[in-house]
Image (cartoon, coloured by chain):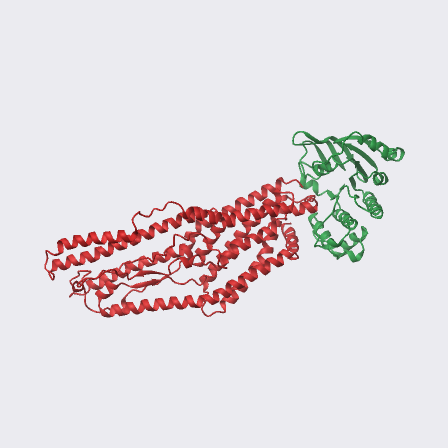
Amino acid sequence: MLETRELTKVYNENVLAVNKLNLTVEDGEIYVVLGANGAGKSTTISMLLNFIEPTSGTALVGDIEIPKFPLEAKKHLAYVSENVELYRNFTARQNLSFFAKLGGRKKVSNAELDETLGRVGLAEEAFTRRVKTFSKGMRQRLGIAIAIMKDAQAVLLDEPTSGLDPKGGADFLNLLRQLKEEGKAIFMSTHDIFRAKEVADRIGILVQGNLERELTREEIQRENLEELYLNYVAGYEPEEEASE
Amino acid sequence: MVWHIAKRELYDNLNSLRFALAAALLLGLMLTNAVVHLREHPERVRQYQKGVSEYQNQLTSHAENSLYDLAQEGPGNLYKKLSDLRFCAEGGETFLSEYADGGYNRWSTDTLKSFWLLAYPTATPNRKNVRPIVTKVDWGFIIGYVLSLVALLFTFDSISGERERGTLRLTLANSIPRHTVLIGKFLGALISISIPFTLSILINLLVISTSSNVHLGTEAWGRLGIIFFIAILYTCLFLALGLLVSARVQRSAVSLVVLLLVWVVLVVFMPSTLASIAGGSPSSSPTLDFWERSEILHDELSNEYDSHRYKEPEDSLKGMQMDGEYVIKDAEQQEQLHAERLNQRVEQVIRARSITRLSPVTIVQHLLESFAGTGFERHLQFLENVQTYAREFRVFIDDTDRADPDSLHIFGVPAGMSKKPVNPEAVPLFEDTLNLSKDFNTATTELLLLLLFVVVLVSGAYLAFVRVEV
């Protein structure tokens, strides 16, 4: 389970990036946070990964308080970033092996690596190819493979579908569903309303650091999400997120 | 985990163009160094052996004539022993004299001749050339200039590049302390540089050891080991600098530009500017020219001698004593003058070297000179050996004269000293030696200073990295 309690981040003492954010992501649930650029999505993920210190409030993975015990908390967190570049001179297998060991795996066999790479839909010939020859979609798949390999309790995804073609996006959502079925708590930030609607169990709409609305699965199906989202963000000038 | 990260860095570096270029450059320079050394060293050895042989022949010839001849002529030119490791650090040897003059005679009359004194050729040490010498492709140049640049090229994007690619976020999303990542990166870069550096050194030594003129004994290998350690320590300094700047800036291109500027300031600008400032500082040398002072002193003594000497008969004992006192005092005064001039120059060079120590490249060059047995510190050791030998030589003359019952024991006068020939084998010979423990003592301050630089920069890199926003 992933939880934030009054989580707040203020940059330079006057730029409010996230304001008293309270949300919970249960195990086996996909929580999607929607928001324009500068809404505070990436700042939230950065605080969940302890890349930045919250100004106030806290976040938990299971019962571990992330700001107090970041190293312990990170054992239970996996992360997929918006633009997974990875190590360009490494092959897919070498990248996966490297990050698996960083994630705490002592020994990983080639068979296990290949199985995970196959599971995320990478062709066998790509296992031993250098990542610099990969398309963005292939790199995103590899990013998911890294998260799967870590076998963490919660998975954080920062705009993972941006730039993916429709097929790549659909495959990616299938992988998320698999992770959900394994009981992972999945927290994904995006501004892709359609994919959010397709995969989310709950959606939170973040506007200028405030969680303006939370929708359940039923509400997502029932309401016109696009219109709702545009209504919330209307009137606010999009701006760059401070940490993006 | 440190090793896991270091291995990745190493693998990445080994597959990079910069690694290939660094390896080719280091290998090319080390081979050049070896070839130049093999071309120049035999001639230096020949010159040294010729000088030593002349010194020994003169000493034998004077000893076989009489004790007076030996005492009046002195030991002759005393040559500085050649260092087998000159290829490591040329150390401005061109500007330092290869010998001390231990047979410097200035005047003679019908009955008297000036006694020998210890003089130091005017280029010893050359006060106009206190700058580090960089034109020679020695190890000092390769380590001081090339290796430091290579270290920066291996680290300028270590952190900023990973941040640009997003791999830093992915790495730090795991349960790994930041210092572990930093140490891993540091070690990875250090090993990546050490591989081509060590290989090029080994090839250099292999080529050099093929020459029959170079004899690398146990101590020389020990010194080479110390030099290698200093090179690694110096590389660590620039690796830490590279990591520090890479952590502080957002983009690798900016990091590279900043580091190149810092490198130019630390390695090129600072040594030359500081040396110019130090070289231009007020000199403590007397306003009167050395030779004028020498002449005045001699004239004063000569006038005093003349004013008293005419009162005594030429062959009287008292007259002979006055002659001896005059000759010996003249030699003492002149030697004192030479020693004073030497000390003034030494002080000036020491002052200049203290100021240039602010630059790490100068520190490393001083250290390499110390352990290669070349350069200024080595020259001071040579001068100390020369002065010790001069004392021994004079004691020998004194003892030998006292052992002759027929001698009047009046030094400085032919009739007052022993006329018997001296066994040449009994005359003490000058032997210039290098002393590793002395080298360590003289290099301690600079070693500590280099270590301090490394500690400060490593701490700076750590503080910058733990605060970096990913």
Residue sitting at x 33%, y 51%: B343
Q: Nearer the viewer, residue A76 or B379?
A: B379
Judged from this view, the residue extending furthest toward the right is A222
Left or right: residue B79 versus residue A235 is: left
Q: Which picture quadrant has residue B23?
A: bottom right
Of the 4 image quadrants, the one containing the C terminus of chain B is top right
Left or right: residue A168 versus residue A62 is: right
Which chain is depicted green?
A: A
Q: Is residue B241 above or below residue B324?
A: above
Left or right: residue B367 versus residue A69 is: left
Image colour for chain B is red
Horizontal and vertical percent position of residue B403? 20, 64
Horizontal and vertical percent position of residue B411? 19, 60
Left or right: residue B80 versus residue A222 is: left
Total of numbered circles in the picture?
0
Q: Nearer the viewer, residue B226 or B247?
A: B247
Residue sitting at x 36%, y 46%: B283
Horizontal and vertical percent position of residue B48? 38, 66
Q: Which picture quadrant has residue A193?
A: top right
Residue B438 can be seen in this image: no
Horizontal and vertical percent position of residue B177? 64, 44
Residue B421 can be seen in this image: yes
